[in-house]
Image: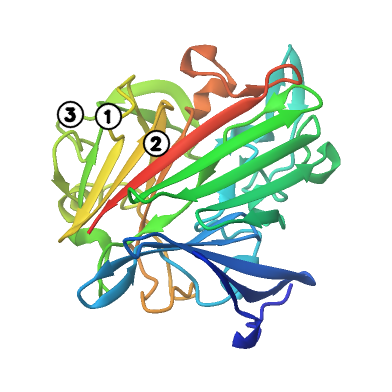
Amino acid sequence: MTGQILPAMNKEDTMGLTTEAFGTVRGAAVTAYTIENKHGVRMTVLDYGATWYKLEVPTAAGHQNLLLSSPDISGYADPGSYHSKTIGRVAGRIGQGHYKQNGQVVNLPANEGTTTLHGGPNGFSTRMWQADASADTVKLTLHVTSADDGFPGDVDVTVTYTLGEDDFVTIDYAATSSAPTLFNPTNHAYWNLNAGDDTIQNHLLTLNSAQHYEVQANKVPTGELLANLHSGFDFSRVTNLGDALAEMQWTEEKGFDDIFAIPAHATDEPVATLTQGAITVQEFSDRNALVVFTANKFGTELNFGEKTSRPYIGIAMEAQTAPSAIDDPKFGDITLSPDQPRHEQIRYHFSY
């Protein structure tokens, strides 16, 4: 793997869209696609990993990026790097690297001990996608065979990022498969709404959740739901993240790496609201789970440019179907069949 920044002369502009060379990964040229709406909100997407590279909002001090972003492709080239990438076929952890499908055990490649994490060692986040960009949309497509990633079936996946004039970003996921398989994608963006180099401990978070999933030591859910009330997990009201993190110091993680259960709700009701100062991000999803991860053990080996990598430098809010759906249909359905394509969507609204 190599990472390099190519000269600025490779930058091209069309109305509402800018493309720029962003180095190479395993010999393949990576391109950054930037879209800007009429309010000056900018979204940048990389074709490698179908990565949401930047989300910039206009402020009195200039444009401010709300995502943790590495300054060059070397920060994304490692297959174990997930920040801002498209995760799949299955987000989260599949315990012991196998599951049952139609009564048969399906074995998968493991990449975290015996666990298959975020689609395994050759998941969506490790692939070069084909991009088609316009003034408001970046559409990325990928063909993955069973031999590529170890999951059954060959799949065709489309991830479409759209920046609206209403300051919404919509991520659409669509997939078809040649055989029964699993599909539970998400985006692994890390948010930090500070203009300076502060952690998320000064952020306010609200979640539409009254329960979270009990997990084993390997973070695979047991299928049991626990109440959030009267604990650090309670974000039913506006909660300071620093206070909540202080309540989690008794845990091994000393922070959050947890699956929150999301009840049925109106489509215009956010599942998560994150605020710092004048900036607010609302996340919308009709799926029944949200993984919240607060970068508890990030170290200086990571490079986020103007943001110094350290614990609590960012928060990921990963909308998905509950991972327990793999074993118990009462938690949802993540199967993808040849006769039934799947479509998922996550939306984000920005106030600034």
For the residue marked with disc 1, what is the amino acid?
A: Ser
Q: Quadrant of residue 276?
A: bottom left
Disc 2 + disc 1, Cβ < 8 Å? yes
Q: Nearer the viewer, mark 3 or mark 1?
A: 1
Q: Nearer the viewer, mark 2 or mark 3?
A: 2
Give the SS element for disc 2. Answer: strand
Q: Is residue 33 left or right of residue 284?
A: right
Going from N to C along the chain, the mark reached first, 2 or 3, is 3
Give the SS element for disc 1. Answer: loop
Q: Which residue is at a point 34% across and 65% down the rendered structure image?
A: 40
Q: Residue furthest front?
A: 15
Across and down, in percent, residue 64 comes to: 31, 70
How dense is the environment of label 2, judged by Cα within 10 Å: few (below 14), some, or many (20 and up)? many
How dense is the environment of label 1, judged by Cα within 10 Å: few (below 14), some, or many (20 and up)? many
- Spatial CA distance of label 3 from label 1 is 10 Å
Disc 2 + disc 3, Cβ < 8 Å? no
Residue 118 visible in the picture: no
Q: Is residue 54 left or right of residue 27?
A: left
Across and down, in percent, residue 15 comes to: 52, 66
In this rendered view, identify the residue nearer to me: 102 or 28. 28
Across and down, in percent, residue 73 comes to: 61, 73
Q: Which residue is at a point 50% across and 18% down the rendered structure image?
A: 332
Q: Which residue is mark 1?
A: 209
Q: Which residue is at a point 80% across and 30% down the rendered structure image?
A: 153
Q: Which residue is mark 3?
A: 229
Q: Is residue 198 left or right of residue 86?
A: left
For the residue marked with disc 3, what is the amino acid?
A: Leu
Q: Which residue is mark 2?
A: 290
Going from N to C along the chain, the mark reached first, 3 or 1, is 1
Type of colouring:
rainbow
